Image (tube, rainbow, N blue to C red):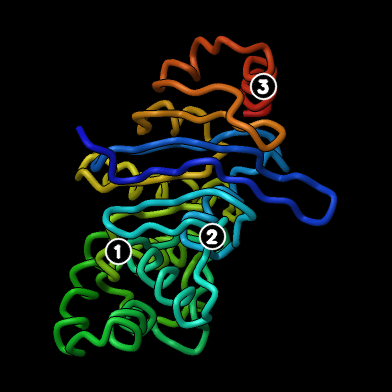
Amino acid sequence: MSALIEVQGLSKAFGDHQVLTGVDFTAAEGTATALLGPSGSGKTTVLRSMNALETPDAGVVTIDDATVDFGSLPESKSGRRREIAALRSRTGMVFQSHNLFPHKTALENLIEGPVQVQHRDPEEAIADARRLLDRVGLADRADAYPSQLSGGQQQRVGIARALALKPRVVLLDEPTSALDPELVGEVLEVVRDLAREGWTLVIVTHEVRFARDVADQVLFLDGGVVAERGGPEVLSEPREERTRQFLSRILAAG
């Protein structure tokens, strides 16, 4: 199976702090990749680099037929914008804390990108948005504003908004980290459904049991490098001592 995602040599420093050093991985279409690791290990920077929300110092990211070599971007601003726009158009991003427009309804949040960025027909975008809200269990909340929704409902709107862009890859940055514990399950179930339906997912998460359930491959990051990788069995029988220590602490904390 050919790779839909190829990440090669991803490196990033913030001042004197080296956050990523030569991160590589590939992922096939229809698979879920889970990025785990301690705070500060670089996993969110990897995710944000994949659609250039963070600009790496070096490395090549390919998603579908869009490639950006961050070490040799075009000199012209227009050339850089074109390459980055092409990469971003292949992805949909789900953030930790929803990032919904507070002055727009759930439905309006979903159609903003398709209409304003992708220039799709508004009626078509509205019809798609209603189907997606139904898909995440919020068909009856289309006219609700974010302040009228629970945290779990807001995050489900955020997932639907990412899908509304019809991306090739969905990037999820700790989608449950900002939620109260009783709301986590409803969001994880939506992500499980996406994995079952064959969406290509890259998920930064601290939910070990969830990752073991949905991931086709797991990358454990530590100190800006991939310290261990493998299938979901890595989370049950890790080879590296650092991974064992991390998992022991996370599972002990519940």
State which tag comes first along the sequence, 3 or 2. Answer: 2
Q: Secondary structure at mark 2?
A: helix
Residue 252: numbered disc: 3
Mark 2: which amino acid?
Ser
The vertical placement of 118 against 21, above or below, is below
Q: Which residue is mark 2?
A: 72
Q: Secondary structure at mark 1?
A: helix
- How far across and how far down the image is residue 118, in percent? 28, 81
- How far across and how far down the image is residue 119, in percent? 25, 87
Mark 3: which amino acid?
Ala
- How far across and how far down the image is residue 137, in percent? 28, 61
The crowding category of the residue bearing disc 3, from other C-alpha atoms within 10 Å (few below 14, some 14 to 19, many at least 20), is: few
Q: Is residue 118 left or right of residue 184?
A: left
**Which-is-in-front pick, marks 2 and 1?**
2
Q: Secondary structure at mark 3?
A: helix
* Contact, mark 3 vs mark 2 (Cβ under 8 Å): no
Mark 1: which amino acid?
Leu
- How far across and how far down the image is residue 32, in percent? 35, 38
Q: CA distance from mark 3 to mark 2?
A: 45 Å
The vertical placement of 153 against 64, above or below, is below
State which tag comes first along the sequence, 2 or 1. Answer: 2
Q: CA distance from mark 3 to mark 1?
A: 34 Å
The residue nearer to you, when weighing 51 against 99, is 51
The crowding category of the residue bearing disc 1, from other C-alpha atoms within 10 Å (few below 14, some 14 to 19, many at least 20), is: many
**Which-is-in-front pick, marks 3 and 2?**
2
The quadrant the N terminus occupies is: top left
The vertical placement of 164 against 219, above or below, is below
* Residue 38, quarter of picture: top right
* Contact, mark 3 vs mark 1 (Cβ under 8 Å): no
Q: Which residue is mark 1?
A: 163
The crowding category of the residue bearing disc 2, from other C-alpha atoms within 10 Å (few below 14, some 14 to 19, many at least 20), is: few
